[in-house]
């Protein structure tokens, strides 16, 4: 159970000497330290709308592509292959931007907006959390 909580897993199955244990959680929150004070939830934002993260040097007209799940972020289809996209590339809606490996499944993450890839925010082969920003896209007008 501690592994599921520590890594934010929704499901964990372990088999040892013919004994199988399966733990399923209804809600798997991101594996982060609990805040010292309650925080008010951020207002909901429609998918594909510009995001203002309050970060300096990030124009408010950029759209963020967020991780739809917890897993490992990969920029390309294999370790020795070129990345799907690079900063400055023109991207199309539906184009594969990266892969997130979750529970040994490779999930292609597609662009939901066409435009120019302004920034890659995650290093290759790094763990990502649900809702974590992965890319910033300057939408085509």
Image: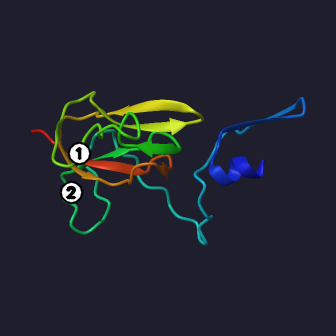
Comparing marks 2 and 1, which lies closer to the viewer?
Answer: 1
Q: Please tell me how crowded label 2 is: few (under 14), some (14-19), or many (20+) other residues with Cα within 10 Å.
A: some
State the residue in front, 77 or 33.
77
Name the residue: 43% across, 51% down.
Answer: 132
The CA distance from mark 2 to mark 1 is 21 Å
Which quarter of the rendered picture does the C terminus lie within?
Answer: top left
**Which of 106/25 is in front?**
106
Upstream in sequence: badge 2 or badge 1 = 2
Q: Which percent across, then down, holds residue 87? A: 21, 49
Residue furthest out toward the left:
141
**Residue drawn at the location 29% of the way across and 66% of the way down:** 55
Query: Farthest residue toward the bottom?
Result: 36
User: Where in the figure is residue 57, as x and y percent of width and height?
Assistant: 21, 66
- Image point (30%, 40%), residue name: 83
Residue 80: x %, y % from top left: 37, 40
Residue at mark 1: 86
Contact, mark 2 vs mark 1 (Cβ under 8 Å): no
Q: Is residue 37 left or right of residue 6?
A: left
* Residue identified by numbered label 2: 60
- Left or right, residue 118 beside residue 20: left
Examine the rendered structure and indicate whether residue 118 appears above or below residue 94. below
Determine the secondary structure under disc 1: loop
Residue 109: x percent and y percent? 38, 34
Check disc 2 and report its element: helix, strand or loop. loop
- Residue 18: assigned label: none
């Amino acid at each position: 159970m501690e592994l599921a909580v520590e890594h934010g897993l929704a499901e964990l199955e372990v088999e040892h000497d013919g004994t199988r244990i399966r733990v399923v959680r209804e809600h798997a929150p991101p594996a982060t330290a609990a805040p010292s004070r309650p925080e008010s939830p951020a207002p909901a934002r429609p998918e594909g709308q510009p995001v203002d993260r309050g970060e300096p040097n990030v124009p408010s007209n950029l759209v963020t592509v967020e991780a739809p799940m917890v897993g490992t972020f990969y920029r390309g289809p294999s370790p020795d292959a070129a990345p799907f996209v690079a900063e400055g590339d023109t991207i199309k809606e539906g184009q594969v931007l990266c892969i997130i490996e979750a529970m040994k499944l490779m999930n292609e993450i597609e662009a939901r907006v066409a435009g120019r890839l302004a920034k890659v925010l995650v290093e290759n082969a790094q763990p990502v959390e649900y809702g974590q920003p992965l890319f910033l896209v300057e939408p085509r007008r």
